[in-house]
Image (cartoon, rainbow, N blue to C red):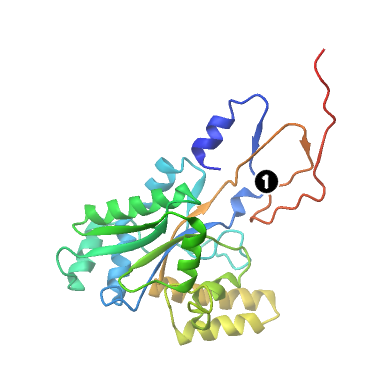
């Protein structure tokens, strides 16, 4: 549910709202994937400039009202390889963003084309509109190309970014470490996998392959962290927010329901109390 829906449902006496006890480890990641094959975005300075232009703290606090936290990277807090010491290297700095764009000789009037869906998640709309506003604030701009239907958009996203598109937005994440491989290994480039931005790095591929084959937990985690550090340096994806509290709404008679870290809900042990009419 959105933050606005959660607040409105709290006033309903016949409904209960709740968040999972594992909320701080939630793994739902909202991010944008850049098409590095595009001439302007091929320059890593441009991708870093976009990161510096976005005030993710304001986005989280003012728009999502504490239901999210700012992502430090593509590995969410629930991941076994998550590094609490790792700091997102691109702090909000509009002046630095302008400087990088000038160094990269980005032409005046350049606009980033953003692919996103209107249906399925109102969060996507807010994120993309905020990204466009952030780029306009540093003297460049953005054009958002909306797909009305969420299923249609997912099929388009899975097929890869079309010609002319710069970035695509997706709200998705997993707590397992293989998540990095699914969305960023070159062999999973669209349309064969979920690497929608066509990111390709032999060094990162090698680390991800080694991690998959490594049985020792500590060694495997270190390999994933090394791969993650290189990914964040190349910045083919801009991680924006992690879902902090996956809120649900249910009737007080519903018992045994547990809200998991991810969207893997099981209703095996859920039941409803007997209903007694008031006298």
Of residues 95 and 1, the one drawn nearer to the viewer in this rendering? 1
Assign a secondary structure to mark 1.
loop
Rendering coords of residue 30 (x, y %): 48, 57
- In the displayed structure, does residue 186 sit left or right of residue 102? right
Rendering coords of residue 90 (x, y %): 36, 62
Of residues 237 and 190, the one drawn nearer to the viewer in this rendering? 190
- 200 above or below 89? below
Image quadrant assignment for residue 112:
bottom left
Of residues 196 and 99, the one drawn nearer to the viewer in this rendering? 196
Residue at 34 percent across and 79 percent down: it is: 37
Of residues 157 and 93, the one drawn nearer to the viewer in this rendering? 157
Rendering coords of residue 34 (x, y %): 38, 70
Rendering coords of residue 258 (x, y %): 73, 46
Image quadrant assignment for residue 212:
bottom right
Instruction: Provide the residue designation for mark 1.
Output: 21
- Point out the residue furthest to the left here: 108
> Which image quadrant: the C terminus?
top right
Residue at 46 percent across and 61 percent down: it is: 153
Image quadrant assignment for residue 181:
bottom right
- Point out the residue furthest to the top here: 279
- In the displayed structure, does residue 44 sit left or right of residue 70? left
- In the displayed structure, does residue 181 sit left or right of residue 125? right
> Which image quadrant: the N terminus?
top right
For the question of whether residue 43 can be seen, the reply is: yes
């Amino acid at each position: 549910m959105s933050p606005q829906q959660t607040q409105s449902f709290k006033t309903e006496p016949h409904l209960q709202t709740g968040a999972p006890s594992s909320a701080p480890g939630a793994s739902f990641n909202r991010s944008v994937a850049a098409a590095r094959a595009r001439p302007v975005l091929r320059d890593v300075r441009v991708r870093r400039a976009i990161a510096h232009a976005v005030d993710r703290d304001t986005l989280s606090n003012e728009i999502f009202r504490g239901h999210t936290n700012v992502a430090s990277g593509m590995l969410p807090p629930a991941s076994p390889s998550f590094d609490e010491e790792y700091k997102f290297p691109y702090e909000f700095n509009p002046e630095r963003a302008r400087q990088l764009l000038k160094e990269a000789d980005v032409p005046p009037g350049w606009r980033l084309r953003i692919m996103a869906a209107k249906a399925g998640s109102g969060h996507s709309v807010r994120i993309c509109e905020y990204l466009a506003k952030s780029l306009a604030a540093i003297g460049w701009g953005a054009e958002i190309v909306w797909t009305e239907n969420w299923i249609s958009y997912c099929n388009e996203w899975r097929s890869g970014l079309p010609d002319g598109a710069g970035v695509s937005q997706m709200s998705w994440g997993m707590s397992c470490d293989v998540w990095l491989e699914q969305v960023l290994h070159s062999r999973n480039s669209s349309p064969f996998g979920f690497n929608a931005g066509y990111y390709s790095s032999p060094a990162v591929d090698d680390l991800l392959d080694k991690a998959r084959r490594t049985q020792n937990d500590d060694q495997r985690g270190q390999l994933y962290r090394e791969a993650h550090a290189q990914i964040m340096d190349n910045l083919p994806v801009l991680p924006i927010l992690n879902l902090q509290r996956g809120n649900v709404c249910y009737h007080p008679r519903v018992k045994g329901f547990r809200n998991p870290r991810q969207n893997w809900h099981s209703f095996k042990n859920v039941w409803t109390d007997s209903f007694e009419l008031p006298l």
